[in-house]
Image: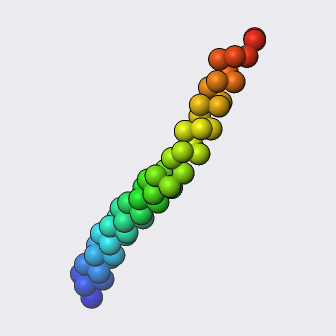
Amino acid sequence: MTAVLAKKLERLAGRRDGMELVQVAILVAIAVALGLIFKTQITAFVNRVFGNLLSADF
């Protein structure tokens, strides 16, 4: 009985690692998609921020 339970727990542990990998892959895909969608806005923001930093008198 305990051997069967141990095998089932091993299978569940393996699945959890697989699910974590899938979750990370989905998050990366979402980040890339948002980057592609908002590429021009992100570029304009970064250029504006660095332009302000370079022109600031400290």
Q: Quarter of the image for the C terminus: give it.
A: top right
Q: Is residue 35 visible?
A: yes
Name above or below for residue 34 compared with residue 50: below
Does the rendering let one see residue 6? no
Residue 48 to residue 10: above or below: above
Q: Position of residue 36 (x, y in %)?
A: 46, 52
Please give the name of the residue rendered at 29% of the width and 81% of the height, measured from the top-left corner: 8
Q: Is residue 24 above or below residue 5?
A: above
- x, y percentage for residue 12? 33, 75
Q: Nearer the viewer, residue 3 or 50?
A: 50
- Residue 45 picture quarter: top right
Q: Is residue 23 left or right of residue 50?
A: left
Q: Nearer the viewer, residue 45 or 13?
A: 45
Q: Nearer the viewer, residue 12 or 57?
A: 57
What residue occupies the far right of the structure in this picture? Answer: 58
Residue 37 image offset from top left, x and y in percent: 50, 55
Q: Nearer the viewer, residue 6 or 42?
A: 42
Residue at x 49% of width, y 50% of height? 35
Q: Is residue 25 left or right of residue 35?
A: left
Q: How is the image coloured?
A: rainbow
Q: Residue at x 57, y 43 (%)?
A: 42
Q: Quadrant of residue 28?
A: bottom left
Furthest residue to the top? 58
